[in-house]
Image (cartoon, rainbow, N blue to C red):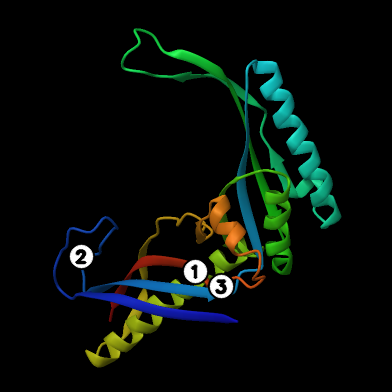
């Protein structure tokens, strides 16, 4: 379901100058900021997780992380995820120290290995099963699950066009109410909006995800794409 809402900020400037960033004419005009917002149901999810291991040696930590990741990828393939749906960073290892105020120097407890994984899921019905698979592989750090649309770029363009149309419609209404005739567009001030980020489903740790294993349903909020444009119209 797609919902489009529009609003506008009307700033009439009939025979005056103003301190706006955009160019203003030295003749009757009005300035309008058109806005729009498109809400759609998500059709994909992005899962971010981290695979970790703590071992006495750095090589052992790396190998355990790699083993967990390989096993995870094998299980995900059974769910229909392919290599193009997965981003996998290289393993990072670092020494892990324990600090004690009674000791002059920290104690080395081992080496920590970690690898960040991003999964893109295009079938939301498989979200619960995917999270369960991650947990079953002993990966306890599910950092975030967020929703998005595969048509994000096109939806952002639609929001931009809707903002321009909103500005013109409101300009026509305001000019008519003032018994003036709306003239041509004199200038446009547009600051490109960053593509709407996927709205976070929420931070999810292993304990939270595990409690949801018995319920395959997840509340999926609509995601939003918004834009705005400021336009100057001449008044005849």
Kindly state the secondary structure of the residue where label 3 is placed: loop
The answer to whether one can see residue 41 in this image is: yes
Q: Quadrant of residue 183?
A: bottom left
Residue 191, picture quadrant:
bottom left
State the mark number for residue 224.
Answer: 1
Answer with mark 2 or mark 1, whichever residue precedes in sequence. 2
- Find the distance from the CA under tag 2 to the CA under tag 1: 38 Å
Q: CA distance from mark 2 to mark 3?
A: 53 Å
Label 2 close to label 1 by CB (< 8 Å): no
Mark 2 or mark 3: name the one nearer the start of the chain.
Answer: 2
Q: Is residue 182 left or right of residue 79?
A: left
Q: Which residue is mark 3?
A: 219
Between 78 and 32, the one nearer to me in the picture: 78
Location of residue 74 with respect to 3 vertically, above or below? above
Residue 129 placed where, x, y %? 73, 61
- Look at mark 2 in the image and give the residue it sits on: 26
Foreground: 86 or 38? 86
Of residue 171 and residue 61, the one placed in the foreground of this image is 61
| Residue lying at 69% horizontally and 67% vertically, measured from the top left | 124
Element under disc 2: loop
Mark 2 near mark 3, Cβ–Cβ under 8 Å? no
């Amino acid at each position: 379901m797609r919902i489009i809402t529009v609003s506008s900020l009307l700033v009439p400037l009939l025979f005056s100058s103003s301190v706006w960033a955009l160019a203003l004419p030295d003749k009757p005009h009005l300035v309008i900021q058109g806005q729009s917002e498109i809400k759609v149901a998500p059709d994909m999810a992005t899962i971010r997780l981290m695979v970790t291991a703590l071992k006495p040696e750095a090589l052992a930590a790396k190998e355990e992380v790699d083993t967990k990741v390989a096993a995870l990828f094998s299980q995900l393939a059974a769910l229909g995820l392919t290599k193009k749906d997965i981003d996998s960073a290289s393993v990072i290892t670092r020494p892990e120290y324990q600090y004690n105020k009674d000791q002059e120097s920290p104690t080395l407890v081992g080496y920590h290995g970690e690898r960040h994984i991003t999964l893109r899921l295009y079938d939301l019905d498989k979200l619960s099963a995917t999270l369960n698979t991650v947990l079953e592989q002993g990966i306890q750090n599910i950092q975030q699950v967020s929703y998005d649309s595969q048509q994000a770029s096109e939806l952002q363009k639609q929001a931009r066009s809707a903002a321009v149309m909103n500005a013109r419609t409101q300009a026509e209404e305001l000019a008519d109410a003032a018994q003036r005739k709306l003239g041509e567009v004199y200038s446009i001030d547009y600051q490109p909006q960053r593509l709407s980020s996927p709205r976070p489903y929420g931070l999810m740790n292993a304990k939270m995800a595990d409690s949801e294993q018995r319920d395959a349903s997840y509340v999926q909020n609509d995601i939003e794409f918004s834009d705005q444009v400021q336009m100057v119209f001449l008044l005849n």
